[in-house]
Image (tube, rainbow, N blue to C red):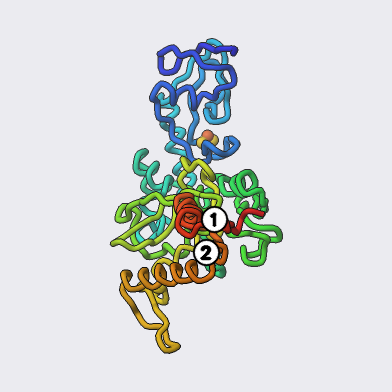
Amino acid sequence: MEMVKLTINGNEIEVPAGTTILKAAEQMGIDIPTLCFLEELSSVGACRMCVVEVKGARALVASCAAAVAPGMEVQTHSPAVMEARKMILDLMVANHPLDCMTCDKMGDCKLADLCYEYGVKESIFKGEKHNYPVETSNPFIMRDMNKCILCGRCVRACAEITGQDTIDFINRGFDSKIAPFFDTELVDSDCVFCGQCVSVCPTGALVEKQMSGKGRRWELSKVRTTCPFCGTGCNFDLWVKDDRIVGVASNTDAPANGRALCVKGRFGWDFVHNENRITTPLIKKDGEFVEASWDEALNLVANSLKEIKEKNGSDSFAALSSARCTNEENYLVQKFTRAVMGTNNVDHCART
Ligand code: FES
């Protein structure tokens, strides 16, 4: 592998050719701020927050999109770089609502974090601001394009993770915005509501509708879980507050799915707290279901199965399991069928 030697902040490092300056700096423990960059997506160098000074270059360089070169001398936090980053943030907030006190994304907003870090309170630029209506017409995603910084993460997530290409940049200049074809609302587009766009949005432009008003991010804890909807085994984190689920967050470490989730996994969790869920066993007596204890219910099932086996033989029993169960549960079903009921009549809904 071809290696490249360069210096970053006066210290030498050797990295494989093709490595970006951002990645090389990361290997040295240097934190360069980013907004449009995301590990799983292609780099487009849209926001310029990651600019660095490269000796001999005519302008500051976007480190997320520039590869290292032999002998390169990079400064990641020089006065010119810090001033440029501050100006970039200033320009972003010039056309931003700055309603952080009531914004649902507060506590999980990268723009707010960077403004705090770089001391940007409000913009020195006074001018026209967008006043787009907030889109709330679908049950899953709230879109407030007034808070969009045009980083394009959502566009790339839709294209590169989901492969749907539902949204893209439209218009030009000050009127540039992200929208589905013909600037429709998401409900009228071919959006599949996987929510990948929400999970990558660094501001309050895209918010999970179900999480709105359910608590600040720092009040929530994350609990890792496996999706119960199908047999793929997607992992994600549940946002939990006061022992109640309030939302779902992608966990990029998930082995089966990474960040990707479908509409059911990301937004279909509300059944958990549905008051119509059956929480105690029910036994039919005189044609009516009546509540029973677990001992009562399990004894009834065990005795009934025993009776069927004794009366009609093992092969009168068959078990059909489900991809919605865990591997362990499916293992137990076949073990019970073979070892207890004495038959190989066991099958699975996802086998064919
Ligand atoms: Fe590099 Fe946006 S993070 S240009």
Q: Kindly state the secondary structure of the residue where label 1 is placed.
A: loop
Indicate yes or no: mark 2 CB to ligand 1 under 8 Å: no
Q: Residue at label 2?
A: 140
Q: Residue at x 51, y 20 (%)?
A: 54
Q: Kindly state the secondary structure of the residue where label 2 is placed.
A: loop
Residue 8, numbered label = none
| Residue 100 figure quarter | bottom left
Q: Residues within 10 Å of mark 2 (few under 14, many from 20)?
A: many
Mark 1 near mark 2, Cβ–Cβ under 8 Å? Answer: yes
Q: Count the labels in the image.
A: 2
- Residue 320, percent from left and from top: 56, 61
Quarter of the image with the C terminus is bottom right
Quarter of the image with the N terminus is top right
Give the residue furthest to the bottom.
286
- Residue 143, percent from left and from top: 53, 60
Q: Residue at x 40, y 59 (%)?
A: 104
Badge 2 amino acid: Phe
Q: Is residue 103 above or below residue 16?
A: below
Q: Residue at x 67, y 61 (%)?
A: 183
Q: Residues within 10 Å of mark 1 (few under 14, many from 20)?
A: many
Depth order, front residue of 87/50:
50
**In this rendering, does residue 204 appear at all?**
no
* Mark toward the start of the polypeptide (1 vs 2): 2
Q: Residue at label 1?
A: 195
Report, in whole angstroms, how far the alpha carbon at label 1 lies from the one at label 2: 8 Å
Q: Is residue 56 above or below residue 180?
A: above
Q: Is residue 180 left or right of residue 96?
A: right
Badge 1 amino acid: Gly
**In this rendering, does residue 316 appear at all?**
yes
- Residue 218, percent from left and from top: 31, 52
- Residue 141, percent from left and from top: 52, 62
Q: Is residue 290 above or below residue 92?
A: below
